[in-house]
Image (cartoon, rainbow, N blue to C red):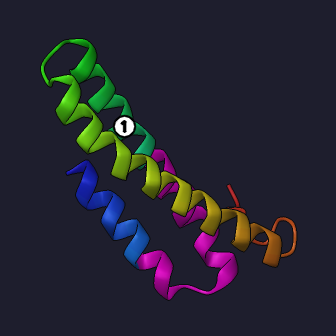
Amino acid sequence: MLFVELLKLVFLASYLNKKEKIPYLRNAISKLDLIKFFFQVLWELKDIDDKNYLIISEPLNEAGRMLGGWLRKMEKETPAGAGERKQ
């Protein structure tokens, strides 16, 4: 379910304007970090072997770099505070 939520956030962010994308991208990055954490726990508990952990972790790390780059680009192109949510 976590992976589906991540895909949904990325999909929605792709259709929003620049300032609206930022909270979605931040949320997507946090979901991805949580997925990576759970895989690391599985690996440390020896529920997945080293080979499978590497097979899974490399694409997840690449996705993290891509989302981080997208977020930095949106933050650079958006005036300060424009993407912040009001509480």
| Above or below, comparing residue 36 to residue 71 in the picture | above
Q: Does residue 53 show up?
A: yes
> Is-magenta flag for residue 18?
yes
For badge 1, the amino acid type reads: Lys
Query: Residue 58 placed where, x, y %?
Result: 36, 45
Residue sitting farthest toward the front: 51
Percent position (x, y) of residue 20? 62, 77
Q: Nearer the viewer, residue 69 or 49?
A: 49
Q: Main secondary structure of the magenta part?
A: helix
Q: Is residue 6 left or right of residue 48?
A: right
Report the residue at 72% width, 71% height from top.
73
Above or below, 85 against 2 in this view is below
Task: List the residue tagged with mark 1.
Answer: 36
Q: Secondary structure at mark 1?
A: helix
Give the residues drawn in magenta, as a range. Answer: 12-31
Residue 17 in the figure: left or right of residue 4: right
**Mark 1: few, some, or many residues within 10 Å (few <14, many ≥20)?**
some
* Residue 83 visible here: no
Question: Relative to 21, is 41 above or below?
Answer: above
Is 19 positioned to the left or the right of 53 in the image?
A: right
Q: Is residue 66 magenta?
A: no
Q: Residue at x 44, y 47 (%)?
A: 61
Residue 44: image quadrant is top left
- Percent x, y for residue 32? 41, 48
